[in-house]
Amino acid sequence: MLVKDQLNRKIKVPGPVNRIVSLVPSQTELLVDLGLKDRLVGITKFCVHPKDLREEIQVVGGTKSVHSEKIYDLQPDLIICNKEENTAAMVRELEDIAPVWVSDIVTIEDSFEMIWLLGKVLGVVEIASEIIERITSEKKAFEKFMKDKPSKNVAYLIWKNPFMAAGPQTFIHSLLRLNNFRNIISEKRYPKVTVGELRWAELVLLSSEPYPFKEADVSELKQKINADVQLVDGEYFSWYGSRLQAAFEYFKSLH
């Protein structure tokens, strides 16, 4: 069958799709929650949910670099990638092995589209729709919870040495806005930032991923800026699949 991915590329996919390689951790978790664990034949070393998945399914590398020969040996019907997490060169190389479906996600609406499109391609539209409905319900409840909460100037750091932050045109930025957080970073995507720039923030959030910030980093930064500094679970801010079902309850704990 001929389908489109989120880059609006036409992909010829064999039907049915019985062997899937997923190179995006959040989408790997989604595939399991869609009831497709038995179709997964290859994942990345960062696909940590469900917990024991890497012990059961072949690990083919990371998100930026994979062992293409391992993927070839797995003879997948479909390879699932993401524009941000995987490289364009990787996608081009993998297209010689199997059809590659690429997601492109900046907003929650993009996430809903990704879940529904994968549900359609993989024949599990009903389950996909149920997941979207649950996320939508949780989001509405959270928006009601946040209605009278004050806004704050915030910086969200994803890396250290040098510091890097999440800026506009990122999924993280979209979720910060839902939390009534005004992102002080104006440069798009993931710019380097200085301690001086962070002094404009009332709150600095240190993510658990991709850099694993710890309490020692909180103490170190607090000595340099006059702002609240807090560790946050990066998976709830950057995983755009079925993990969103639990994200909004987590966000309530931040307020």
Image: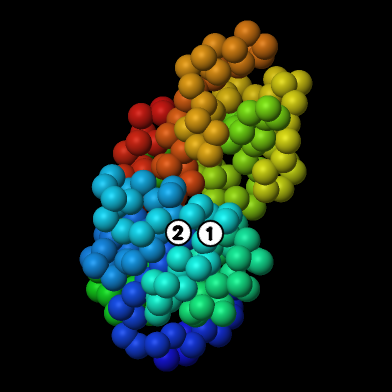
Res 215 seen here: yes
Direction from residue 231 to residue 198 in the image, left or right: right
Which residue does the image show at 27% across and 59% down from the upper left? 33
Mark 1 nearby-residue class (10 Å; few <14, some 14–19, many ≥20): some
Q: Which label sits on residue 66?
A: 1
Q: How many numbered discs sit on the rendered protein? A: 2
Q: Residue at x 27, y 55 (%)?
A: 56
x then y, percent, for residue 29: 34, 55
Q: What residue does disc 2 label?
A: 60
175 vs 139, left or right, is right
Q: Assess whether mark 2 and mark 1 are in contact (beta carbons under 8 angstroms).
A: yes
Image position, residue 4 (x, y; %): 51, 81
Instruction: Report the residue at 26% width, 47% height from top.
Output: 52
Q: Residue at x 36, y 42 (%)?
A: 248
Who is closer to the viewer here, 4 or 248? 4
Task: State which quarter of the image contains the C terminus.
Answer: top left
Q: Does the rendering let one see residue 4?
A: no
Q: Where residue 112 sits in the image (x, y, percent)?
A: 42, 64
Secondary structure, mark 2, is loop
Q: Residues within 10 Å of mark 2 (few under 14, many from 20)?
A: many
Q: Amino acid at mark 2?
A: Val
